Image (spheres, rainbow, N blue to C red):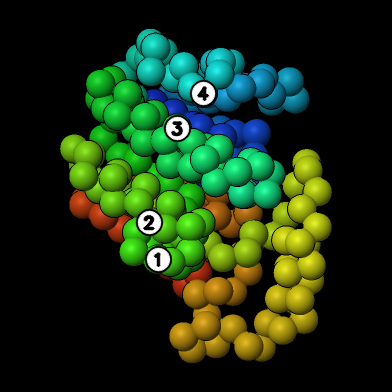
Amino acid sequence: MDQTKVTSRTALLLGASGLVGSFCLQALLETPAYQSVISVARRALPDVTHPRLEQRVLPLETFGSLELPPVQDVFCALGTTIRKAGSQQVFRQVDYELPLAAAKHAIKFGAEQFILVSSVGADSKSGNFYLRTKGELEDALQALPFKAVHFLRPSLLLGERRESRSLESMAIAAARLLQFLFAGPLRRYHPVHAMTVGRAMISAARANGNDCSIYEYDEIMHLQIE
């Protein structure tokens, strides 16, 4: 990370306890681009302390009542799986309703950019419930009055998770064996490490873009080396 002087910007992070979110938080605390980082989560992160970090612990369903200082950039790494959620309804609450409610609330405190970890293949017209939900969230965020929205669309995420996801682990193992297949049109499905995605989120926010930017595998890797 560029070690220039600390700026006056404040970052709001949702999902810091997750795989990508934990790396995003680490990157936010490494860069002097933000004078303050506010992490909002259901539980405290006892192993993470930093003079520029403020942890707000609360049920995310009550986010709309949270008072915030002026915030410029919102980083969202919230996400679950239908299997872990237990139903499509609960999955939609975590992956659509909560991020959208947080985005609307953050705008009241001056938020200019929203940086979201979405999914490769996200499409509001998809016949797949998971991908349709991701696409509907992207569409809803684009309709809000942000200066810019950034959608990172990784495929399989590599990295050590706190919880076991056996099916995902098998898919990652197979993908590693078949990496030679991820060429041409299939390159967007190349597995990517969660650390790369987390750090790319900060690079996307600092790109000074406007409107909507979408990053798939190659674009995420490019952000990582800028």
Residue lying at 36% horizontally and 36% vertically, measured from the top left: 100
Q: Is residue 109 left or right of residue 99?
A: left
Which comes sooner in the sequence, label 3 or label 4? 4
Q: Secondary structure at mark 4?
A: helix
The answer to whether marks 1 and 4 mark residues whose Cβ atoms lie closer than 8 Å is no
Distance between the alpha carbons at the discs numbered 3 and 2 = 15 Å
Which comes sooner in the sequence, label 1 or label 4? 4
Q: Please, what is the three-letter code of the amino acid marked with disc 1?
A: Ser
The answer to whether marks 3 and 4 mark residues whose Cβ atoms lie closer than 8 Å is yes
Distance between the alpha carbons at the discs numbered 1 and 3 = 21 Å
Tag shown at residue 208: none
Q: Position of residue 69 (x, y in %)?
A: 35, 14
Closer to the eye: label 1 or 4 = 1
Q: Secondary structure at mark 2?
A: helix
Q: Please, what is the three-letter code of the amino acid marked with disc 4?
A: Leu
Tag shown at residue 135: 2
Q: Position of residue 188 (x, y in %)?
A: 50, 75
**What residue is shown with label 1?**
126
Query: Which image quarter: residue 45?
Result: top right
